Amino acid sequence: MIVYGRALLSRISVCNWISGSFLSTESGRTGGKKEISNLVQDIVGMATANTSTNSKNARKKEVKKETGLCLTTKKGESFGEWYSEVVVNSELIEYHDISGCYILRPWTMTIWETMQTFFDVEIKKMNIKNAYFPLFVSKNVLQKEKDHIEGFAPEVAWVTKSGQNDLEVPIAIRPTSETVMYPSFSKWIRGHRDLPLKLNQWCNVVRWEFSHPTPFIRSREFLWQEGHTAFATKEEADKEVLEILELYRRIYEDYLAIPVVKGRKSELEKFAGGLYTTSVEIFIPNTGRGIQGATSHCLGQNFAKMFEIDFENEKGEKSLVWQNSWAYSTRTIGVMVMVHGDDKGLVLPPKVAAVQIIIIPVPYKDADMEAIFAACSSAVQTLQAAGFRAEHDFRDNYSPGWKYSHWEMKGVPLRIEIGPKDIDKNQVRIVRRDNGSKADVPTTNLVEHVRDLLSNIHESLFNTAKVKSDACKKIVYTWEDFITALNEKKWILAPWCDEEEVEKDVKARTKGELGAAKTLCSPFDQPSLPEGTLCFASGKPAKKWTYWGRSY
Protein backbone atom coordinates (compact mmCIF):
# COMPACT_ATOMS: atom_id res chain seq x y z
CA MET A 1 0.00 0.00 0.00
CA ILE A 2 1.44 3.38 -1.06
CA VAL A 3 1.03 6.05 1.63
CA TYR A 4 0.89 9.83 0.95
CA GLY A 5 -0.05 12.91 2.92
CA ARG A 6 -3.22 14.73 1.83
CA ALA A 7 -1.30 17.95 1.10
CA LEU A 8 0.76 16.14 -1.52
CA LEU A 9 -2.18 14.29 -3.05
CA SER A 10 -4.32 17.41 -3.37
CA ARG A 11 -1.60 19.15 -5.33
CA ILE A 12 -0.91 16.44 -7.86
CA SER A 13 -4.39 16.15 -9.27
CA VAL A 14 -3.91 17.40 -12.82
CA CYS A 15 -0.99 16.36 -14.95
CA ASN A 16 0.28 16.41 -18.49
CA TRP A 17 2.25 13.69 -20.20
CA ILE A 18 4.86 15.31 -22.42
CA SER A 19 7.66 13.14 -23.79
CA GLY A 20 7.00 10.67 -21.00
CA SER A 21 7.48 13.25 -18.23
CA PHE A 22 5.17 14.20 -15.37
CA LEU A 23 4.52 17.91 -14.86
CA SER A 24 2.64 19.36 -11.91
CA THR A 25 0.29 22.15 -13.03
CA GLU A 26 -0.67 23.37 -9.56
CA SER A 27 1.58 25.65 -7.57
CA GLY A 28 2.32 25.32 -3.90
CA ARG A 29 3.88 22.91 -1.47
CA THR A 30 3.98 19.34 -2.86
CA GLY A 31 5.93 17.52 -0.18
CA GLY A 32 9.44 16.14 -0.17
CA LYS A 33 11.39 14.99 -3.19
CA LYS A 34 11.12 11.35 -2.24
CA GLU A 35 7.32 11.45 -2.15
CA ILE A 36 7.15 13.11 -5.57
CA SER A 37 9.61 10.63 -7.02
CA ASN A 38 7.58 7.70 -5.71
CA LEU A 39 4.33 9.18 -6.98
CA VAL A 40 5.74 9.86 -10.42
CA GLN A 41 7.02 6.28 -10.69
CA ASP A 42 3.66 4.98 -9.55
CA ILE A 43 1.71 7.03 -12.10
CA VAL A 44 4.13 6.39 -14.94
CA GLY A 45 3.93 2.67 -14.28
CA MET A 46 0.15 2.75 -14.56
CA ALA A 47 0.08 5.06 -17.57
CA THR A 48 2.32 2.84 -19.68
CA ALA A 49 -0.47 0.28 -19.88
CA ASN A 50 -2.30 2.69 -22.15
CA THR A 51 0.48 3.03 -24.73
CA SER A 52 0.26 -0.41 -26.32
CA THR A 53 -2.53 0.52 -28.72
CA ASN A 54 -1.11 3.87 -29.85
CA SER A 55 0.47 2.54 -33.04
CA LYS A 56 -2.68 0.68 -34.00
CA ASN A 57 -4.87 3.76 -33.63
CA ALA A 58 -2.35 5.93 -35.46
CA ARG A 59 -3.11 3.94 -38.61
CA LYS A 60 -6.75 4.96 -38.52
CA LYS A 61 -7.97 7.88 -40.57
CA GLU A 62 -9.45 9.85 -37.69
CA VAL A 63 -7.33 11.45 -35.00
CA LYS A 64 -8.20 9.16 -32.10
CA LYS A 65 -7.32 9.44 -28.45
CA GLU A 66 -6.47 6.68 -26.01
CA THR A 67 -8.00 6.52 -22.55
CA GLY A 68 -5.52 8.05 -20.13
CA LEU A 69 -5.23 9.80 -16.78
CA CYS A 70 -4.48 13.35 -17.89
CA LEU A 71 -5.03 15.70 -20.82
CA THR A 72 -2.21 16.79 -23.07
CA THR A 73 -4.13 19.74 -24.54
CA LYS A 74 -5.72 22.74 -22.84
CA LYS A 75 -9.24 23.84 -23.72
CA GLY A 76 -8.14 27.35 -24.59
CA GLU A 77 -5.24 26.28 -26.80
CA SER A 78 -6.67 23.68 -29.18
CA PHE A 79 -10.37 23.14 -28.59
CA GLY A 80 -10.80 20.28 -31.06
CA GLU A 81 -7.90 18.29 -29.68
CA TRP A 82 -9.04 18.98 -26.11
CA TYR A 83 -12.58 17.81 -26.90
CA SER A 84 -11.35 14.61 -28.54
CA GLU A 85 -9.24 13.80 -25.49
CA VAL A 86 -11.99 14.53 -22.97
CA VAL A 87 -14.67 12.32 -24.55
CA VAL A 88 -12.26 9.36 -24.62
CA ASN A 89 -10.35 9.87 -21.36
CA SER A 90 -13.56 10.44 -19.38
CA GLU A 91 -14.85 7.13 -20.76
CA LEU A 92 -17.82 8.63 -22.59
CA ILE A 93 -16.98 7.01 -25.93
CA GLU A 94 -14.58 4.66 -27.66
CA TYR A 95 -13.73 4.82 -31.34
CA HIS A 96 -15.11 2.26 -33.79
CA ASP A 97 -13.32 1.13 -36.93
CA ILE A 98 -15.91 2.85 -39.16
CA SER A 99 -15.29 6.58 -39.36
CA GLY A 100 -18.04 8.66 -37.76
CA CYS A 101 -19.37 5.78 -35.63
CA TYR A 102 -18.69 5.63 -31.91
CA ILE A 103 -19.18 3.23 -29.03
CA LEU A 104 -21.27 4.88 -26.33
CA ARG A 105 -19.90 3.67 -23.01
CA PRO A 106 -21.94 3.25 -19.81
CA TRP A 107 -20.90 6.72 -18.56
CA THR A 108 -22.66 8.17 -21.62
CA MET A 109 -25.67 5.90 -21.50
CA THR A 110 -26.48 6.87 -17.92
CA ILE A 111 -26.61 10.54 -18.94
CA TRP A 112 -28.81 9.67 -21.92
CA GLU A 113 -31.11 7.48 -19.82
CA THR A 114 -31.52 10.23 -17.21
CA MET A 115 -32.70 12.69 -19.85
CA GLN A 116 -34.80 9.98 -21.46
CA THR A 117 -36.57 9.22 -18.18
CA PHE A 118 -37.46 12.88 -17.66
CA PHE A 119 -38.67 13.43 -21.22
CA ASP A 120 -40.59 10.17 -21.44
CA VAL A 121 -42.58 10.99 -18.29
CA GLU A 122 -43.38 14.49 -19.53
CA ILE A 123 -44.61 13.48 -22.99
CA LYS A 124 -46.78 10.76 -21.47
CA LYS A 125 -48.46 13.50 -19.44
CA MET A 126 -49.35 14.96 -22.86
CA ASN A 127 -50.85 11.59 -23.87
CA ILE A 128 -48.06 10.87 -26.34
CA LYS A 129 -47.47 7.13 -26.80
CA ASN A 130 -44.23 5.32 -27.58
CA ALA A 131 -43.99 3.15 -30.69
CA TYR A 132 -41.27 1.76 -32.92
CA PHE A 133 -41.06 1.83 -36.72
CA PRO A 134 -38.63 -0.02 -39.00
CA LEU A 135 -35.11 1.19 -39.73
CA PHE A 136 -35.59 0.75 -43.48
CA VAL A 137 -37.67 2.69 -46.00
CA SER A 138 -38.29 2.01 -49.68
CA LYS A 139 -37.02 4.37 -52.35
CA ASN A 140 -40.50 5.17 -53.63
CA VAL A 141 -41.82 6.14 -50.22
CA LEU A 142 -38.69 8.13 -49.34
CA GLN A 143 -39.04 10.21 -52.49
CA LYS A 144 -42.71 11.06 -52.07
CA GLU A 145 -42.02 14.45 -50.49
CA LYS A 146 -39.68 16.22 -52.93
CA ASP A 147 -38.38 19.06 -50.73
CA HIS A 148 -37.90 16.69 -47.82
CA ILE A 149 -35.77 14.16 -49.68
CA GLU A 150 -33.75 16.89 -51.40
CA GLY A 151 -32.82 18.19 -47.94
CA PHE A 152 -31.64 14.77 -46.79
CA ALA A 153 -30.48 13.16 -50.06
CA PRO A 154 -26.71 13.60 -49.49
CA GLU A 155 -26.98 11.93 -46.07
CA VAL A 156 -29.06 8.88 -46.99
CA ALA A 157 -27.29 5.51 -46.70
CA TRP A 158 -28.56 2.75 -49.01
CA VAL A 159 -28.60 -1.03 -48.68
CA THR A 160 -27.85 -2.45 -52.13
CA LYS A 161 -26.79 -6.06 -51.47
CA SER A 162 -27.97 -9.11 -49.56
CA GLY A 163 -24.99 -11.40 -49.11
CA GLN A 164 -23.43 -11.56 -52.57
CA ASN A 165 -26.63 -10.69 -54.43
CA ASP A 166 -27.70 -7.23 -55.53
CA LEU A 167 -31.13 -6.14 -54.31
CA GLU A 168 -33.65 -5.50 -57.06
CA VAL A 169 -34.61 -2.25 -55.39
CA PRO A 170 -32.20 -0.41 -53.03
CA ILE A 171 -33.50 0.18 -49.50
CA ALA A 172 -32.74 3.39 -47.61
CA ILE A 173 -31.74 3.54 -43.94
CA ARG A 174 -33.81 6.21 -42.22
CA PRO A 175 -32.15 9.63 -41.81
CA THR A 176 -35.41 10.59 -40.05
CA SER A 177 -38.76 8.81 -39.95
CA GLU A 178 -41.43 10.99 -41.55
CA THR A 179 -41.55 8.85 -44.66
CA VAL A 180 -41.37 5.63 -42.62
CA MET A 181 -44.28 6.51 -40.35
CA TYR A 182 -46.74 8.48 -42.44
CA PRO A 183 -48.04 5.66 -44.69
CA SER A 184 -49.29 4.09 -41.44
CA PHE A 185 -50.79 7.39 -40.29
CA SER A 186 -52.80 7.37 -43.52
CA LYS A 187 -54.20 3.92 -42.63
CA TRP A 188 -54.94 4.68 -38.99
CA ILE A 189 -56.62 8.06 -39.36
CA ARG A 190 -60.12 7.95 -40.86
CA GLY A 191 -62.32 10.25 -38.86
CA HIS A 192 -62.10 13.08 -36.33
CA ARG A 193 -62.36 10.56 -33.48
CA ASP A 194 -58.97 9.14 -34.54
CA LEU A 195 -57.34 12.49 -33.74
CA PRO A 196 -55.09 13.58 -32.31
CA LEU A 197 -52.60 10.81 -33.08
CA LYS A 198 -49.47 11.41 -31.01
CA LEU A 199 -46.51 9.03 -31.21
CA ASN A 200 -42.87 9.07 -30.17
CA GLN A 201 -40.07 6.63 -30.79
CA TRP A 202 -36.66 6.18 -29.19
CA CYS A 203 -34.32 4.93 -31.89
CA ASN A 204 -31.17 5.43 -33.92
CA VAL A 205 -30.83 7.12 -37.29
CA VAL A 206 -28.08 7.17 -39.90
CA ARG A 207 -26.88 10.24 -41.79
CA TRP A 208 -23.88 9.39 -43.90
CA GLU A 209 -22.48 12.17 -46.04
CA PHE A 210 -20.18 14.55 -44.18
CA SER A 211 -16.55 15.31 -43.44
CA HIS A 212 -14.89 16.01 -40.09
CA PRO A 213 -16.86 13.62 -37.86
CA THR A 214 -17.01 14.68 -34.21
CA PRO A 215 -18.25 12.45 -31.38
CA PHE A 216 -21.81 13.38 -30.36
CA ILE A 217 -21.82 16.51 -32.55
CA ARG A 218 -21.54 15.04 -36.05
CA SER A 219 -21.75 11.27 -36.25
CA ARG A 220 -23.04 8.90 -38.88
CA GLU A 221 -25.25 7.05 -36.43
CA PHE A 222 -26.77 8.59 -33.33
CA LEU A 223 -29.51 8.02 -30.78
CA TRP A 224 -32.52 10.29 -30.50
CA GLN A 225 -36.18 10.50 -29.83
CA GLU A 226 -38.49 11.67 -32.57
CA GLY A 227 -42.08 12.60 -32.02
CA HIS A 228 -44.68 12.63 -34.79
CA THR A 229 -48.17 13.93 -34.17
CA ALA A 230 -51.31 14.71 -36.18
CA PHE A 231 -54.13 17.11 -35.27
CA ALA A 232 -57.42 18.31 -36.65
CA THR A 233 -56.47 21.99 -36.39
CA LYS A 234 -53.42 24.20 -36.79
CA GLU A 235 -54.06 25.74 -33.38
CA GLU A 236 -53.54 22.37 -31.70
CA ALA A 237 -50.35 21.78 -33.67
CA ASP A 238 -48.97 25.25 -32.87
CA LYS A 239 -49.63 24.73 -29.17
CA GLU A 240 -47.75 21.42 -29.07
CA VAL A 241 -44.75 22.82 -30.93
CA LEU A 242 -44.12 25.27 -28.11
CA GLU A 243 -44.88 22.77 -25.34
CA ILE A 244 -42.26 20.38 -26.70
CA LEU A 245 -39.75 23.19 -27.18
CA GLU A 246 -40.19 24.08 -23.51
CA LEU A 247 -39.34 20.49 -22.56
CA TYR A 248 -36.14 20.81 -24.58
CA ARG A 249 -35.30 24.01 -22.75
CA ARG A 250 -35.78 22.17 -19.46
CA ILE A 251 -33.44 19.36 -20.56
CA TYR A 252 -30.67 21.83 -21.27
CA GLU A 253 -31.20 24.28 -18.44
CA ASP A 254 -32.62 22.11 -15.64
CA TYR A 255 -30.56 18.97 -16.28
CA LEU A 256 -27.44 20.00 -18.21
CA ALA A 257 -27.09 23.50 -16.68
CA ILE A 258 -26.75 25.06 -20.15
CA PRO A 259 -28.53 28.34 -21.03
CA VAL A 260 -30.41 28.34 -24.33
CA VAL A 261 -32.22 30.77 -26.59
CA LYS A 262 -35.62 29.70 -27.87
CA GLY A 263 -36.59 30.96 -31.31
CA ARG A 264 -37.78 30.33 -34.83
CA LYS A 265 -35.63 29.27 -37.74
CA SER A 266 -35.55 31.19 -41.01
CA GLU A 267 -37.24 29.82 -44.12
CA LEU A 268 -33.83 28.81 -45.43
CA GLU A 269 -32.88 26.95 -42.26
CA LYS A 270 -36.22 25.33 -41.42
CA PHE A 271 -36.86 21.57 -41.64
CA ALA A 272 -37.06 20.45 -45.27
CA GLY A 273 -40.72 20.12 -46.27
CA GLY A 274 -42.05 21.68 -43.06
CA LEU A 275 -44.13 24.79 -42.44
CA TYR A 276 -41.88 26.29 -39.76
CA THR A 277 -39.19 25.20 -37.31
CA THR A 278 -38.49 26.29 -33.74
CA SER A 279 -35.30 25.47 -31.88
CA VAL A 280 -33.21 25.92 -28.78
CA GLU A 281 -29.82 27.39 -29.63
CA ILE A 282 -26.57 27.35 -27.65
CA PHE A 283 -23.35 29.26 -28.22
CA ILE A 284 -19.89 27.77 -27.65
CA PRO A 285 -17.59 30.67 -26.65
CA ASN A 286 -14.34 28.77 -27.23
CA THR A 287 -15.08 28.27 -30.91
CA GLY A 288 -17.38 31.21 -31.61
CA ARG A 289 -20.03 28.89 -33.03
CA GLY A 290 -23.69 28.35 -32.36
CA ILE A 291 -25.13 24.90 -32.10
CA GLN A 292 -28.70 23.76 -32.63
CA GLY A 293 -29.68 21.96 -29.44
CA ALA A 294 -33.08 20.51 -30.42
CA THR A 295 -35.90 21.29 -32.83
CA SER A 296 -39.69 21.27 -32.79
CA HIS A 297 -41.29 21.54 -36.23
CA CYS A 298 -44.76 22.31 -37.45
CA LEU A 299 -45.00 20.37 -40.71
CA GLY A 300 -48.28 21.99 -41.72
CA GLN A 301 -50.30 19.91 -44.21
CA ASN A 302 -47.58 19.22 -46.77
CA PHE A 303 -46.81 15.67 -45.68
CA ALA A 304 -50.51 15.01 -45.15
CA LYS A 305 -51.10 15.91 -48.78
CA MET A 306 -48.26 13.70 -50.05
CA PHE A 307 -49.26 10.69 -47.93
CA GLU A 308 -53.03 11.25 -48.11
CA ILE A 309 -53.51 11.62 -44.37
CA ASP A 310 -57.03 13.02 -44.21
CA PHE A 311 -60.04 12.60 -41.98
CA GLU A 312 -63.78 13.14 -42.01
CA ASN A 313 -64.71 15.97 -39.69
CA GLU A 314 -67.88 16.28 -37.62
CA LYS A 315 -69.73 17.79 -40.61
CA GLY A 316 -68.80 14.84 -42.80
CA GLU A 317 -66.27 16.87 -44.79
CA LYS A 318 -62.80 15.63 -45.77
CA SER A 319 -59.86 17.58 -44.28
CA LEU A 320 -56.09 17.16 -44.19
CA VAL A 321 -54.47 16.76 -40.79
CA TRP A 322 -51.95 19.21 -39.34
CA GLN A 323 -48.68 17.55 -38.35
CA ASN A 324 -45.68 18.14 -36.12
CA SER A 325 -42.35 16.43 -35.66
CA TRP A 326 -39.75 17.10 -32.98
CA ALA A 327 -36.47 15.58 -31.80
CA TYR A 328 -33.42 15.83 -29.59
CA SER A 329 -30.41 13.54 -29.74
CA THR A 330 -27.16 12.48 -28.08
CA ARG A 331 -25.77 15.76 -29.42
CA THR A 332 -26.93 17.13 -26.07
CA ILE A 333 -24.07 15.27 -24.39
CA GLY A 334 -21.47 16.76 -26.71
CA VAL A 335 -22.80 20.24 -25.99
CA MET A 336 -22.51 19.54 -22.25
CA VAL A 337 -18.85 18.52 -22.67
CA MET A 338 -18.07 21.65 -24.70
CA VAL A 339 -19.75 24.06 -22.30
CA HIS A 340 -18.65 22.72 -18.90
CA GLY A 341 -15.45 20.73 -19.49
CA ASP A 342 -12.10 22.13 -18.34
CA ASP A 343 -8.39 21.33 -18.40
CA LYS A 344 -8.91 18.49 -15.91
CA GLY A 345 -11.52 16.80 -18.12
CA LEU A 346 -15.25 16.36 -17.92
CA VAL A 347 -17.44 18.39 -15.55
CA LEU A 348 -20.83 16.78 -14.98
CA PRO A 349 -23.96 18.59 -13.79
CA PRO A 350 -25.18 16.66 -10.73
CA LYS A 351 -28.59 15.70 -12.13
CA VAL A 352 -27.13 13.65 -14.99
CA ALA A 353 -23.99 12.28 -13.29
CA ALA A 354 -23.91 8.49 -13.06
CA VAL A 355 -21.95 8.96 -9.83
CA GLN A 356 -22.66 12.17 -7.95
CA ILE A 357 -20.29 11.51 -5.05
CA ILE A 358 -17.15 9.38 -5.08
CA ILE A 359 -15.68 8.44 -1.70
CA ILE A 360 -11.96 7.72 -1.47
CA PRO A 361 -10.08 6.33 1.54
CA VAL A 362 -6.86 8.17 2.35
CA PRO A 363 -4.34 5.80 3.99
CA TYR A 364 -1.62 7.00 6.33
CA LYS A 365 1.27 5.09 7.86
CA ASP A 366 0.13 2.81 10.70
CA ALA A 367 -3.50 3.87 10.12
CA ASP A 368 -6.38 1.54 10.96
CA MET A 369 -7.43 0.82 7.39
CA GLU A 370 -10.39 -1.32 8.42
CA ALA A 371 -11.83 1.66 10.27
CA ILE A 372 -11.23 3.93 7.27
CA PHE A 373 -12.91 1.49 4.87
CA ALA A 374 -15.81 1.07 7.29
CA ALA A 375 -16.26 4.85 7.49
CA CYS A 376 -16.26 5.08 3.68
CA SER A 377 -18.83 2.30 3.37
CA SER A 378 -21.00 3.92 6.00
CA ALA A 379 -20.90 7.26 4.18
CA VAL A 380 -21.91 5.56 0.92
CA GLN A 381 -24.85 3.82 2.59
CA THR A 382 -25.99 7.05 4.25
CA LEU A 383 -25.88 8.99 0.99
CA GLN A 384 -27.53 6.25 -1.06
CA ALA A 385 -30.32 5.98 1.52
CA ALA A 386 -30.89 9.71 1.04
CA GLY A 387 -31.31 9.20 -2.72
CA PHE A 388 -27.86 10.21 -3.95
CA ARG A 389 -25.76 8.23 -6.43
CA ALA A 390 -22.66 7.55 -4.33
CA GLU A 391 -19.86 5.01 -4.65
CA HIS A 392 -16.52 4.32 -3.00
CA ASP A 393 -13.22 3.51 -4.71
CA PHE A 394 -11.44 0.77 -2.75
CA ARG A 395 -9.08 -0.30 -5.53
CA ASP A 396 -5.76 -1.10 -3.89
CA ASN A 397 -3.64 -0.97 -7.05
CA TYR A 398 -4.04 2.82 -7.40
CA SER A 399 -2.86 5.57 -5.08
CA PRO A 400 -5.33 8.15 -3.72
CA GLY A 401 -3.74 10.83 -5.92
CA TRP A 402 -4.33 8.73 -9.02
CA LYS A 403 -7.96 8.21 -7.98
CA TYR A 404 -8.43 11.95 -7.48
CA SER A 405 -7.31 12.64 -11.06
CA HIS A 406 -9.30 9.71 -12.44
CA TRP A 407 -12.61 10.85 -10.97
CA GLU A 408 -11.91 14.48 -11.81
CA MET A 409 -11.39 13.39 -15.42
CA LYS A 410 -14.76 11.63 -15.34
CA GLY A 411 -16.42 14.77 -13.98
CA VAL A 412 -17.92 13.45 -10.74
CA PRO A 413 -19.42 16.52 -8.98
CA LEU A 414 -18.21 15.76 -5.44
CA ARG A 415 -15.29 13.86 -3.97
CA ILE A 416 -15.24 12.81 -0.32
CA GLU A 417 -11.91 11.94 1.29
CA ILE A 418 -11.75 10.02 4.58
CA GLY A 419 -8.53 9.47 6.51
CA PRO A 420 -7.69 8.68 10.14
CA LYS A 421 -7.84 12.33 11.24
CA ASP A 422 -11.32 12.60 9.74
CA ILE A 423 -12.45 9.56 11.73
CA ASP A 424 -10.99 11.04 14.93
CA LYS A 425 -12.88 14.29 14.31
CA ASN A 426 -16.06 12.56 13.07
CA GLN A 427 -15.88 14.46 9.77
CA VAL A 428 -15.19 14.06 6.06
CA ARG A 429 -13.46 16.31 3.56
CA ILE A 430 -15.59 17.27 0.53
CA VAL A 431 -14.01 18.58 -2.68
CA ARG A 432 -16.07 20.17 -5.48
CA ARG A 433 -15.24 19.24 -9.07
CA ASP A 434 -16.49 22.51 -10.60
CA ASN A 435 -14.27 24.91 -8.64
CA GLY A 436 -11.98 22.72 -6.52
CA SER A 437 -13.12 24.21 -3.20
CA LYS A 438 -12.73 22.01 -0.11
CA ALA A 439 -14.57 21.81 3.20
CA ASP A 440 -14.42 19.62 6.28
CA VAL A 441 -17.97 18.58 7.13
CA PRO A 442 -19.27 16.80 10.25
CA THR A 443 -20.69 13.40 9.39
CA THR A 444 -23.87 14.32 11.28
CA ASN A 445 -24.58 17.04 8.66
CA LEU A 446 -23.34 15.09 5.63
CA VAL A 447 -26.66 14.55 3.82
CA GLU A 448 -27.83 18.15 4.19
CA HIS A 449 -24.45 19.53 3.18
CA VAL A 450 -24.22 17.31 0.09
CA ARG A 451 -27.74 18.24 -0.97
CA ASP A 452 -26.95 21.95 -0.71
CA LEU A 453 -23.63 21.52 -2.52
CA LEU A 454 -25.10 19.62 -5.47
CA SER A 455 -27.81 22.25 -5.88
CA ASN A 456 -25.20 25.00 -5.71
CA ILE A 457 -22.99 23.22 -8.25
CA HIS A 458 -25.82 23.11 -10.79
CA GLU A 459 -26.60 26.78 -10.21
CA SER A 460 -22.94 27.73 -10.44
CA LEU A 461 -22.40 25.78 -13.67
CA PHE A 462 -25.47 27.41 -15.24
CA ASN A 463 -24.52 30.93 -14.15
CA THR A 464 -20.92 30.54 -15.29
CA ALA A 465 -22.05 29.27 -18.69
CA LYS A 466 -24.55 32.12 -19.02
CA VAL A 467 -21.98 34.78 -18.17
CA LYS A 468 -19.59 33.38 -20.78
CA SER A 469 -22.35 33.05 -23.38
CA ASP A 470 -23.77 36.53 -22.77
CA ALA A 471 -20.28 38.01 -23.02
CA CYS A 472 -20.15 36.72 -26.61
CA LYS A 473 -23.40 38.39 -27.69
CA LYS A 474 -23.03 41.47 -29.85
CA ILE A 475 -25.77 43.77 -31.16
CA VAL A 476 -24.93 45.28 -34.56
CA TYR A 477 -26.74 47.54 -37.02
CA THR A 478 -24.34 47.71 -39.97
CA TRP A 479 -22.53 45.30 -42.25
CA GLU A 480 -19.14 46.61 -41.14
CA ASP A 481 -19.92 45.97 -37.48
CA PHE A 482 -21.33 42.56 -38.41
CA ILE A 483 -18.07 41.48 -40.05
CA THR A 484 -16.03 42.79 -37.12
CA ALA A 485 -18.17 40.86 -34.63
CA LEU A 486 -18.03 37.72 -36.77
CA ASN A 487 -14.24 37.85 -36.85
CA GLU A 488 -14.30 38.25 -33.06
CA LYS A 489 -16.24 34.97 -32.81
CA LYS A 490 -19.42 36.55 -31.48
CA TRP A 491 -23.00 35.49 -31.88
CA ILE A 492 -24.62 38.46 -33.42
CA LEU A 493 -28.07 39.94 -32.88
CA ALA A 494 -28.96 42.12 -35.84
CA PRO A 495 -32.07 43.70 -37.40
CA TRP A 496 -33.06 41.79 -40.52
CA CYS A 497 -35.51 42.21 -43.37
CA ASP A 498 -36.39 38.48 -43.24
CA GLU A 499 -35.71 37.87 -46.93
CA GLU A 500 -34.28 34.54 -48.08
CA GLU A 501 -32.16 36.07 -50.84
CA VAL A 502 -30.51 38.40 -48.36
CA GLU A 503 -29.65 35.45 -46.11
CA LYS A 504 -28.14 33.62 -49.08
CA ASP A 505 -26.12 36.71 -49.90
CA VAL A 506 -24.78 36.95 -46.34
CA LYS A 507 -23.69 33.30 -46.56
CA ALA A 508 -21.95 33.91 -49.88
CA ARG A 509 -20.17 37.07 -48.68
CA THR A 510 -18.88 35.46 -45.46
CA LYS A 511 -17.81 32.13 -46.91
CA GLY A 512 -14.28 31.20 -45.89
CA GLU A 513 -12.08 28.70 -44.13
CA LEU A 514 -14.02 28.99 -40.89
CA GLY A 515 -17.37 28.57 -42.64
CA ALA A 516 -20.07 31.01 -43.63
CA ALA A 517 -22.32 32.94 -41.29
CA LYS A 518 -26.01 32.07 -41.25
CA THR A 519 -29.11 32.71 -39.22
CA LEU A 520 -29.26 30.75 -35.96
CA CYS A 521 -32.77 31.75 -34.93
CA SER A 522 -35.05 34.73 -34.45
CA PRO A 523 -35.56 34.75 -30.66
CA PHE A 524 -39.07 34.67 -29.27
CA ASP A 525 -37.94 37.30 -26.78
CA GLN A 526 -37.60 40.15 -29.29
CA PRO A 527 -35.94 43.43 -28.29
CA SER A 528 -37.70 46.62 -29.27
CA LEU A 529 -37.38 47.38 -32.98
CA PRO A 530 -37.88 51.14 -33.47
CA GLU A 531 -39.68 52.27 -36.60
CA GLY A 532 -37.23 53.07 -39.36
CA THR A 533 -34.64 50.47 -38.28
CA LEU A 534 -32.90 49.08 -41.35
CA CYS A 535 -31.62 45.58 -42.10
CA PHE A 536 -27.90 45.33 -41.40
CA ALA A 537 -27.25 43.51 -44.68
CA SER A 538 -29.67 44.92 -47.25
CA GLY A 539 -30.58 48.38 -45.98
CA LYS A 540 -34.28 47.52 -46.35
CA PRO A 541 -36.75 48.03 -43.51
CA ALA A 542 -36.05 45.49 -40.77
CA LYS A 543 -38.85 43.17 -39.66
CA LYS A 544 -37.22 41.36 -36.72
CA TRP A 545 -34.13 40.77 -34.65
CA THR A 546 -32.23 37.61 -35.58
CA TYR A 547 -29.19 35.82 -34.22
CA TRP A 548 -26.44 35.21 -36.76
CA GLY A 549 -23.12 33.44 -36.59
CA ARG A 550 -21.09 30.45 -37.63
CA SER A 551 -22.45 27.14 -36.46
CA TYR A 552 -21.74 23.44 -36.08
Image (cartoon, rainbow, N blue to C red):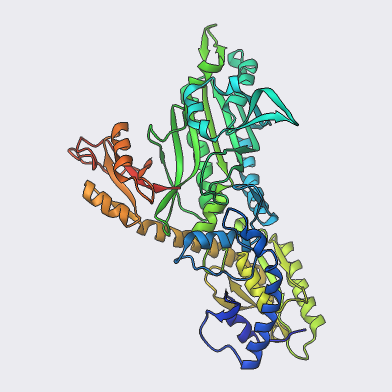
Q: Is residue 242 above or below residue 148?
A: below
Residue situated in front as seen by the camera: 128 or 93: 93
**Residue drawn 49% across the image and 54% down it:** 258
Point out residue 321 in the picture as x, y percentages from the top left corner: 53, 18
Residue 525 in the image: above or below residue 380: above
Q: Position of residue 533 (x, y in %)?
A: 20, 40
Q: Name the residue: 32% across, 37% down.
A: 503
Quadrant (top left, top right, bottom left, bottom right) of the N terminus:
bottom right
Q: Quadrant of residue 385?
A: bottom right
Q: Is residue 300 left or right of residue 105?
A: left
- Residue at position x 32%, y 57% from top? 488
> Where, by quadrant of the figure, is residue 381 drawn?
bottom right
Which one is nearer the viewer's eye here, 409 or 248? 409
Residue 185 shows in the view: yes
* Near-viewer residue (342 or 40): 40
Q: Residue furthest left?
A: 532
The number of discs equals 0
- State the image coordinates of residue 191 (x, y, percent, origin top left): 60, 13
Residue ranking furthest to the top: 316
Q: Is residue 167 left or right of residue 239?
A: right
Query: In front here: 255 or 211?
Result: 211
Residue 206's place in the image compared with 188, above or below, is below
Image quadrant of residue 309? Answer: top right
Q: Note whether residue 128 is visible.
A: no
Q: Is residue 153 left or right of residue 199?
A: left
